[in-house]
Amino acid sequence: MKKIGITGSLSSGKTTASKFLSNRRGPLFSADNEVKKLYKKKSFINLIRKKFNIKNKLNIKSILKKEILNNKSNIKKLEKIIHPLVRKEMKKFIKKNKLKKFIFFEIPLLIESNLIKNFDVIFFIKAKKNIRLKRFKQKGGNQKLFHVLNNKQLKDKIKMKYSDHTIVNEKNLNILKKKLSDIFTAYE
């Protein structure tokens, strides 16, 4: 089993690259999807409400975004809750798929979270900040939040050092797919 990690900066195209790479090659674990699942669990919502002293039962995510914008240290507080839960699911995913030739992992903070040693190959999806900001805003994101989250991540030069492959994703989808295919054929 080869464990393939896909990472990149905010709105660089990690999800698109991950879906393409894993398609017909192996199962995909998405850290972002696991976080979305957490927000649907009553126990998780109650834990967040307690830790952040949130009275309102509705719109937990938007309240958290405001909390983060008001105090950047709240990101760390949130990550201390979320990251162990996501890692637990990641271990289950590995165990469940141990007989597969390839298993894929889309993890935005793969390098920042010191998970490098868990992967055989790491793909880093890269794009200029102005392109990523435009993509983030097109998905309904807030510019201020983009900068807070972006500043939390390591610089591209550092991420590139820890990655086996860097794919620049600043053009169109066909170019991205071709670059990924050209690289991945060496592993098949």
Image: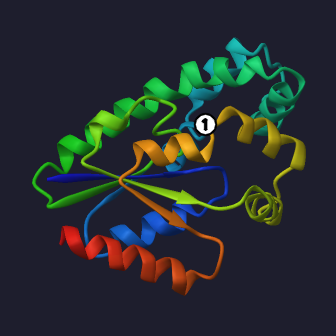
Spot occupied by residue 68 in the image (x, y as percentages of width and height):
80, 27
Q: Is residue 122 left or right of residue 82?
A: left
Q: Quadrant of the C terminus?
A: bottom left
Specify the quadrant of the image occupied by residue 48.
Answer: top right
Specify the quadrant of the image occupied by residue 133.
Answer: bottom right
Tell me the element at label 1.
loop
Q: Residue furthest bottom?
A: 174
In the depicted structure, whether residue 177 falls above or below residue 154: below
Query: At x 83% / y 32%, what residue is drawn?
Result: 63
The 10 Å Cα crowd at callout 1, few under 14, some 14 to 19, many 20 or more, is: some
Check disc 1 and report the residue beneath it. Answer: 154
Q: Is residue 188 left or right of residue 70?
A: left
Q: Is residue 119 visible?
A: yes
Query: At x 81% / y 35%, what residue is drawn?
Result: 65
Query: At x 67% / y 57%, what residue is drawn?
Result: 11
Q: Is residue 9 left or right of residue 149?
A: left
Spot occupied by residue 139 in the image (x, y as percentages of width and height):
77, 63
In the depicted structure, whether residue 63 falls above or below residue 136: above
Spot occupied by residue 21 in the image (x, y as percentages of width and height):
37, 69
Query: At x 53% / y 40%, what residue is drawn?
Result: 158
In the depicted structure, whether residue 102 falls above or below residue 92: below
Spot occupied by residue 182 in the image (x, y as percentages of width and height):
34, 79
Q: Is residue 86 left or right of residue 53?
A: left
Q: Is residue 43 visible?
A: no
Specify the quadrant of the image occupied by residue 102.
Answer: bottom left
The residue under label 1 is which amino acid type? Leu
Closer to the camera in the image, 138 or 38: 138
